Amino acid sequence: MTAATDQPHRRLLLVHAHPDDESINNGATMARYAAEGARVTLVTCTLGEGGEVIPPELAHLTADRDDTLGPYRVGELTAAMRELGVTDHRFLGGRGRYRDSGMMGVAENKVPGCFWQADVDEAAGHLVEVVREVRPQVLVTYDERGGYGHPDHIQAHRVALRAWELAADPAFRPELGASWRIAKVYYNRLPRPVVEEGLAAAKGVFPGVAALGDLPGVVEPEVITTVVDGAAYAGAKSAAMAAHATQIAVSGEVFALSNDLGQPLLATEYYQLVRGTPGPGRPETDLFAGVAA
């Protein structure tokens, strides 16, 4: 276990449901902080076995055929992390511990071993182990709806917030290391006017354009507390998203998922502080604003 004195001054932990979620939501942020010398740790909760596949030549990977999409997406995630300069990536509880649960309401939600069926405290315990090792000051995850209602995203929110509580409790599994309080917790957000402008600009790139309600975490601008300028890392984010080729098609500043509906690829990324004390200024321009070493 790494001693706190050996850690970089700034340490960021991101908790995501599937491979590709991190690059879409936080790719520019991750690349920026990694380039600036922060320790960026990504925890992914499933292998994304239930995803659809865009390239026809890889259609055999899906769960209803070869069921080998999960391992393939591990390789995509590894490539994406290289593009972002992130060297610390883990799967919650180890690779393959929790299976993709599929969209809400499908039969996969009830399969034993899927993430939606996981005991929250047990899953949070796996994350506590990471928290106490890495000792991050900042945690980024989804809101209580998981951004758009996917069960794995909702569960990732529950597990992340529970781990935030349990990691600070010295009575919880002391064998995992000394207790640690994460100073700030953020939700991924998208400001409505920015998204509306981006969707208008996305017309004509793919067969259709995504609906505003289909995008995760859209809120009114006043909800946004923090804006991270990742313009210098737009290329890294685009390349990381393109590395998830089974899931994402990228065309310039627009991307589409398997539904072929265009949406904006944003280099500026937006957040809502939900735990901790905000730094000076509104909005903040740094997730670590006001955080002591």
Image (tube, grey):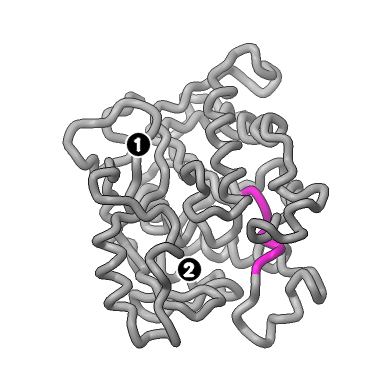
Where does the image place residue 137, in percent across and percent down from the top left? 42, 31
Q: Is residue 96 visible?
A: no
Residue position for label 2: 241
Q: Does residue 54 lie above or below 290 as drawn?
A: below
Badge 2 marks a residue whose secondary structure is helix
Residue position for label 1: 273
Q: Is residue 218 visible?
A: yes
Residue 162 quadrant: top right
Q: Does residue 265 lie above or below 108 as drawn?
A: below
Residue farthest to the left, as pictured: 281
Identify the amino acid type marked 1: Leu
- Front-lying residue, 224 or 104: 104
| Mark 1, other Cα within 10 Å: few <14 / some 14–19 / many ≥20 | many
Answer with mark 1 or mark 2, whichever residue precedes in sequence: 2
Which marked residue is nearer to the observer: mark 1 or mark 2? 1
In the image, is residue 54 part of the stretch drawn in magenta?
Answer: no
Range drawn in magenta:
45-51
Residue 133 quadrant: top right
Name the residue rendered at 32%, 28% in the picture. 291
Badge 1 marks a residue whose secondary structure is strand
Name the residue rendered at 43%, 83% in the picture. 208
Name the residue rendered at 54%, 62% in the picture. 20
Where does the image place residue 140, in percent across and percent down from the top left? 45, 42
- Front-lying residue, 152 or 32: 152
In the image, is residue 50 part of the stretch drawn in magenta?
Answer: yes
Where does the image place residue 277, in percent across and percent down from the top left? 31, 26
Q: Is 34 on the left-hand or right-hand side of 163?
A: left
Residue 55 quadrant: bottom right
Which quadrant would the C terminus be assigned to in this image? Answer: top left
